[in-house]
Image (tube, coloured by chain):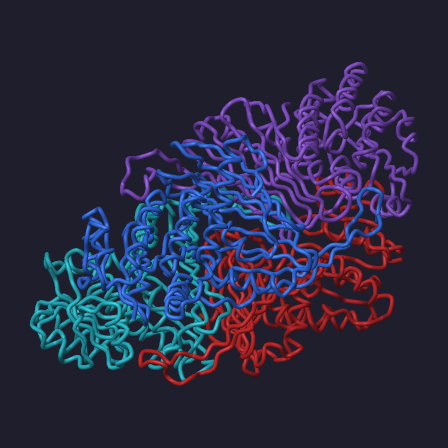
Chain colours: A cyan, B red, C purple, D blue
Amino acid sequence: MNRVGVIGYGYWGPNLVRNFQEAPEATVQVVCDKDPARLAVAQKRYPHLRLTRDAQDVFRDAAVDLVAVMTPISTHFDLAKAALEAGKHVLVAKPLTMSLDQAERLVALAEKHRRMLAVDHTFVYAPAVRTLREIVRRGDLGEIYYYDSTRVNLGLIQHDVNVIWDLAAHDVSILDFLFDDRPVSVAARGVSHVGAHETLAYLFVQFAGMLVAHIHVNWLAPQKVRMVLVGGSRKMIVYDDNEPSEKLKVYDRGVLLGKAVDRDTTLVQYRTGDMLAPQIPTTEALRIECEHLLDCIRQGTTPLTGGAHAVNVVRMLEAAQQSIRQGGQEVRL
Amino acid sequence: MNRVGVIGYGYWGPNLVRNFQEAPEATVQVVCDKDPARLAVAQKRYPHLRLTRDAQDVFRDAAVDLVAVMTPISTHFDLAKAALEAGKHVLVAKPLTMSLDQAERLVALAEKHRRMLAVDHTFVYAPAVRTLREIVRRGDLGEIYYYDSTRVNLGLIQHDVNVIWDLAAHDVSILDFLFDDRPVSVAARGVSHVGAHETLAYLFVQFAGMLVAHIHVNWLAPQKVRMVLVGGSRKMIVYDDNEPSEKLKVYDRGVLLGKAVDRDTTLVQYRTGDMLAPQIPTTEALRIECEHLLDCIRQGTTPLTGGAHAVNVVRMLEAAQQSIRQGGQEVRL
Amino acid sequence: MNRVGVIGYGYWGPNLVRNFQEAPEATVQVVCDKDPARLAVAQKRYPHLRLTRDAQDVFRDAAVDLVAVMTPISTHFDLAKAALEAGKHVLVAKPLTMSLDQAERLVALAEKHRRMLAVDHTFVYAPAVRTLREIVRRGDLGEIYYYDSTRVNLGLIQHDVNVIWDLAAHDVSILDFLFDDRPVSVAARGVSHVGAHETLAYLFVQFAGMLVAHIHVNWLAPQKVRMVLVGGSRKMIVYDDNEPSEKLKVYDRGVLLGKAVDRDTTLVQYRTGDMLAPQIPTTEALRIECEHLLDCIRQGTTPLTGGAHAVNVVRMLEAAQQSIRQGGQEVRL
Amino acid sequence: MNRVGVIGYGYWGPNLVRNFQEAPEATVQVVCDKDPARLAVAQKRYPHLRLTRDAQDVFRDAAVDLVAVMTPISTHFDLAKAALEAGKHVLVAKPLTMSLDQAERLVALAEKHRRMLAVDHTFVYAPAVRTLREIVRRGDLGEIYYYDSTRVNLGLIQHDVNVIWDLAAHDVSILDFLFDDRPVSVAARGVSHVGAHETLAYLFVQFAGMLVAHIHVNWLAPQKVRMVLVGGSRKMIVYDDNEPSEKLKVYDRGVLLGKAVDRDTTLVQYRTGDMLAPQIPTTEALRIECEHLLDCIRQGTTPLTGGAHAVNVVRMLEAAQQSIRQGGQEVRL
């Protein structure tokens, strides 16, 4: 039975509290937030919880063995560092830190203290993404051509980072999880329409093999869109995370360059077969994640979204940010 | 009553024949195609039509006063030039030519011969685009932030050009039609997955004012997507051309940077009001186009998709192509 | 080569003219309409056509061997009768006649004159319905429970019949085509919101076996809905004719009454497997129909939508009408 | 501060616990369930809760002043009766009881004991339904023609009642809430495909004025559909509860019987104007309901879903059940 301390009871923190509280192998010991109004909300829901406004209380609590840091990105490094140094396992909201240097230092610290360091890249645990990964890994798509994501909404504009660190972080994590092919460069362009940070950005990622990825993120869009296209030589997939069910549609479609059917167009030879929407479990991703992490602690194994994964994500985001600053120039990873 | 000669009875040509034939002020005089099988199709439909495999027959036909060139892009220049020199008005499939130089020479030739030169940029005549333009021009959106288009499908891969010249041509034409703000540069990246030409491309267009545009085109996508987002400071629009009705959705949404509601996030102050889908006429765009062009001939006026518009489109496409060749570098217009 | 005379160039007639004109084995000889404006439209499109305002001209034309009667239902009987008596094959717009008696007399007349009598129940030729039929006939659904159709729109209110004869006619035809199980009774309720005839109606059809069918039709609905659910013990189907592709979705779902999982509910044991959307050809149904009918004439065979099918449809519609008049009472067939 | 006892921690009970626990003016005192496994779930979530397997413990608990009965319908009467007799306010899962007689007896008992009796007809508190009601009450639709609901899914088949008491109960409640026009009769047909009770049913409700309502419910449908059409002489509404936002679409459409435009059809004169999707608050309906009920207790007022509403619903359901038993005959209310 792990005892969890949760720091940050804002937008996402309550979901961690609920899932750890309901997990068979854990219980929430203490919740920390600087804002008394948020603590009052926590207390109304869970009268049994210990509350504090001081993160040190969490680190000092000997009963706590896992700390979930669910605060703004700019605070991740200090809080995670303190938690590791206090001998706690640590789960950090995504992305891990604001720089690759910080991320690597935390990973080293976790290794030194032999504690789990994990990042809440929730999509890695989402049943749709796991099913997508299985399809990709089985080779059903043939040679994989592209991953194209549109992830936009009228969103919670964050004050310490731009839209890349918020929304593109999801796709970068998914890319790292789905494919063996490794990214070699990124080129990004971004625009700031409201506030100090980019609210709209486009990333183009080149991989070592044939794969390319494109990520479109926007905090000022009229509708919420969560649409990923994955194209391969044999099959193609639409992954629409807004769909309540049928999130994945696998199209038995491919093309062959045929001979010119007519002078206007070399009509590609389509294979347009059936579309299959595989059954996807409805388990909450965060539930799967919490149980996976508790399992890793118990068995001393590395989580799927452990240090290596977290570092890969931060490396890409940092490079994308640099590319934006350099006017869209390609940045090697 | 104009008498029309149509060159090219492949994929799109039959639509021109049908619309000119049914237009009150025109009739189709002759159809030309190199392929006897296509001519046989035309004859079965319209037994009264004169048919020929030789474009010269069209140019020489004194009764013909308007020639529609509906052939592959690489043939446009020669055919349009010959038609103009034969004293015909000319409508050319989009885009006008494969180079800016060719486009400007045709425009000059049309002026010299005092003949109409128009390009079949059909979307300019589409009721949804016209309604969108009215909304934009009325200032309903406030300051316009971005135009973002996804135009992908499992498509007719063309043998003489890449996907930009085929699909992005639509967006470039729409951009020229919608906004007063003028593009100043374009950066593009493209990948060729099948065949010799790019089948996937991304264009980022910077305008003189605040506007940016992004265009995503792909010939190897599992679904047909025709989705344009237009974001402004006061309202935002989703234009989904796949919708049978309700192609435009105008969201009364905007954001103001509020004070930090919570330390995690500066919650922007949303204005999320009603959504309005304006009634859009169901008239076929090509019908409107044909009647507009016949009107222009009658009155000696310049069509909406005349030389200037056509040149703007080709200039952008050529620059985008150059940017792809230069690895995504920004190309000034 | 059949020579076709088309009577009625209103809403649907032009589609028959186009398809017969383009069919390899036919040509349109003459078009008849009482309205000179409609004839002018036909002439502009097809200058080669012979036109007439008098249906007798069609019957007397020795070159014509197939007459398509595309006029209001109340005129079908007289026109089809005259055509058969003139020795023509006849295709009639759906449904065949306004009474079972008339329908049976036409069938007898066609047999007597050894001419084809067919009804334009187009859905029987629609690729989606044909694929649906194959799935049903293969037994994939297990025992078939129900057919439930919603077919509503803001529609062309007809002046001589109610919404049942217009819209429910489609479902009654599809039911006859899909299933071996035979209907034994119908109960219907209808309401007239505008005009003299019912604009909204609900039909409940009991079959000899386990199957029941329900048909909901409405001329005064805000959206066009064309949604059919077919439920079976092993699989279930959604047939949405508004979908551009993916018209059929086959759900690998069934239920078994399990033991009570909890006292509140006997949780049925769901089998919720994958969903498959079979590839459906995009050929126009009317094209398939025209070629099928020309084939039947050539070979002297009975069309799928011949007399027997047509009579089945009219029998059901007449019984439904009677049920409405009797306040929803069940009427035996 | 009300202290709530919740009986039944199965499918819906946890939502009541959560909402009452989080409501500012209430707290959950005790949770009762016969199933120890369910109690264990409650305890893991809320370690502070008192638990019991015996409902009498709840009634005897002097601190409890509001009892929420969230058990199968067949147990409602006895539990609600006992709670009222113990002097508690009572909220009962929908519908109130399995017979009109029982419902009226509970209402009388509540009056006698001067306690609140409310039913959890949640849709009455749903922001979409409230917005719909405002539109209806403002008279925007003109004369109201029909209410047509499709409410189907692959569902939790209940062991003590048929699909009418489960799903149609929602529409009957919504009808009572939306319209002043009163129902005068109902005719229903149902079929049992799995188990002892009807799993598919159709209800046709006649009102005193012009309104008719139709309700289609099915526990064995391949997709979840929650689609209501409301048609009026001036506007028409689509209410799709599956839509994440844009649940209501108000179509500025109506028809007038025009003169015959053509002999085939009296083309109704459409007014097809814009479609408006009003902004709808995203507050959880159950949250609104809980706060409304606590307010009613505090102020001694009658809840929107109090005894009168509950009785109206049960009266209709009982009549529908009787109609099914009588083969679809109209039953007067």
Residue A324 visible somewhere in the drawing = yes
Which quadrant is home to the N terminus of chain B? bottom right
Q: Which of the two residues, D124 or C115, is positioned nearer the viewer here?
A: D124
Which quadrant is home to the C terminus of chain B? bottom right
**In the depicted structure, whether residue C96 falls above or below residue B280:** above
* Name of the residue lying farthest toward the top: C112
Q: Residue at x 56, y 69 (%)?
A: B274
Coordinates of residue D215 in the picture (x, y in percent): 54, 45
Coordinates of residue B33 in the picture (x, y in percent): 73, 47
Q: Residue at x 20, y 71 (%)?
A: A6
Q: Which of the two residues, D90 or C316, is positioned nearer the viewer here?
A: D90
A108 vs D197, left or right, is left
D282 vs B251, left or right, is left
**In the depicted structure, whether residue B159 falls above or below residue D48:** above
Coordinates of residue A268 in the picture (x, y in percent): 54, 47
Q: Which of the two residues, C242 or A116, is positioned nearer the viewer here?
A: C242
Task: Determine which quarter of the picture holds residue D154.
Answer: top left
**In the depicted structure, whether residue D28 falls above or below residue C136:** below
Q: Which of the two residues, D245 or A99, is positioned nearer the viewer here?
A: D245
C12 vs D318, left or right, is right
Task: Determine which quarter of the picture holds residue A291.
Answer: bottom left
| Count of number-bearing discs | 0
Residue A215 visible somewhere in the drawing = no
Coordinates of residue A300 in the picture (x, y in percent): 10, 59
